[in-house]
Amino acid sequence: MKTKSSKSFVDDFMNYVKSKDPMQFEFHQAVKEVVETLAGYLLANPRYLHARILERMVEPERMIQFRVPWADDRGNIHINRGYRIEMNSAIGPYKGGLRFHPTVNQSILKFLAFEQVLKNSLTSLPMGGGKGGSDFDPKGKTDNEVMRFCQSFMSELFRHIGQYTDVPAGDIGVGGREIGFLFGQYKRLRNEFTGILTGKGIEWGGSLIRPEATGYGAVYFAEEMLKTRNDSIKGKVVAISGSGNVAQFAAEKVIELGGRVVTLSDSSGSIYDPGGIDTEKLAFVKELKNIHRGRIKEYAEKYNVQYLGKQRPWSIKCDAALPCATENEINGEEARMLTKNGCFVVAEGANMPSNYDAEHHFLDSKILYGPGKAANAGGVAVSGLEMTQNSMRLAWSREEVDSKLHSIMVNIHKMCVQFGQDTNGYTNYVKGANIAGFVKVANSMMAQGLV
Ligand code: GLU
């Protein structure tokens, strides 16, 4: 084993993963990124190889798939698939979001659950990793339809989760509204009020700053990366993709820190506002997306700015890019376009938004590149803080939660530098995040024996 080169180690391991689930491309991509950066470390620390930790980590501890039947407002019956991947519980109860989106399948959820294990470890809070969701599409559905769907979904999920077992939260397509319906149904079925979900409403057990956490955290992380070059967000032109929860609060924090946000997007296209999205325009976006559930195109119409139909915002000249939409939303060509136009900071608010080529381009270009599992860990970190508050039956102030979030992001950045800095001084944050996240989980798995 010791004499094996990193390259052949990666190839052998990927052949093993692919042979088990040949069609799970997103999962392969997430695993490959991790194994590539871990290979050298593992070969130098063969105890992890002998214990076959990596082989164990790519195998979910448990995978649940279930039927979710529901009726729309006209009485038509629909059948969706529900899932929960309970990936790893070495350092705490399974923790991770639920995604409702037509693209949801086992590959997507396994990639997300695998990333979640390392991300949660990086937060330094006691949370294992999991992910779940459904191929249900909330877009265009009425509140009542979403409620009936959530009730049906929870009617099966409730038997698998619990405050000490598995604590889901939101992700794409699952926000405050859905968490409310899911929580209500859980409580009804169990006759018990416990912190079994995070992202709850503030009046019923939620934490202040949880809605802001992922977006704010990504900007705090970008700010830490910039500090290493004696720079800051202030005065920077920032391209943000997405217009949902993560993008909205990333934009809010960039504006607060004096940066200029020039783009937002949704699955239909992007808006380009060269003058910058200010607080008032951002309030319009929040209302448009969270209440009217409209399209970002309406921003372009209202403020008379350019709308790039069917396009992502990466052709726009910027200093910093914050991809906050979804996986694989930056390809190699777009990554090259970004750096060619001067972009030198990328902090990922979404999970795996850069594809394999894009990620390698960013690393080869030696820009400040913060991968999702480090840069977007603020969301799950504040979920962890929500769990703590629920256990203590207390609620902390905004300032208290925000300052804890900030220190967690600073600490994640520090760990990435510790494990990811090359001899020439460049920090490979991908390597840093993967090794730092891995070590804690791996050591805990070794301590707990062959389970
Ligand atoms: N879905 C978010 C993530 O990708 C948050 C998960 C959570 O709060 O449990 O990390």
Image (cartoon, grey):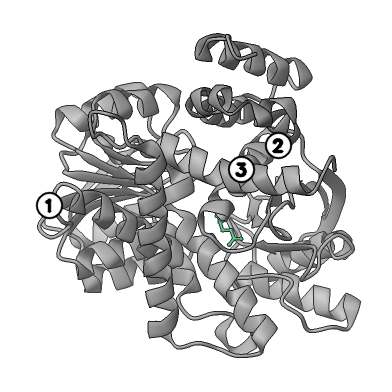
Regarding residue 75, the answer to whether it shows in the image is: no
Name the mark nearer the viewer: 3 or 1.
Answer: 1
> Mark 1 highlights which residue?
230
Q: Are marks 2 and 1 in contact (CB under 8 Å)?
A: no
Q: Which residue is depicted at the point 68% across and 38% down?
A: 110
Tell me which label, 3 or 1, sits earlier in the chain.
3
Alpha carbons under labels 2 and 1: distance apart: 38 Å
> In which quadrant will I find the C terminus?
top right
Alpha carbons under labels 2 and 3: distance apart: 13 Å
Type of amino acid under label 2:
Met
Type of amino acid under label 3:
Leu
Estimate the x, y position of residue 185 in percent, counting from the top left.
81, 74
Q: Is mark 2 within 8 Å of ligand 1?
A: no
Q: Which residue is depicted at the point 20% across and 30% down?
A: 339
The residue nearer to you, when weighing 432 against 84, is 432
> Mark 3 highlights which residue?
112
**Within 10 angstroms of label 2, few (less than 14), some, or many (20 or more) residues?**
some
> Where on the image, by quarter, is ligand 1?
bottom right
Regarding residue 145, the answer to whether it shows in the image is: yes
Tell me which label, 2 or 1, sits earlier in the chain.
2
Estimate the x, y position of residue 439 in percent, counting from the top left.
58, 43
The residue nearer to you, when weighing 60 against 410, is 410
> Mark 2 highlights which residue?
57
Type of amino acid under label 1:
Asn
With respect to residue 133, does 26 lie above or below? Answer: above
**In the structure shown, which secondary structural element does the residue marked by tag 1 occupy?**
loop
Estimate the x, y position of residue 367 in percent, counting from the top left.
23, 34
Say left or right for 139 vs 313: right
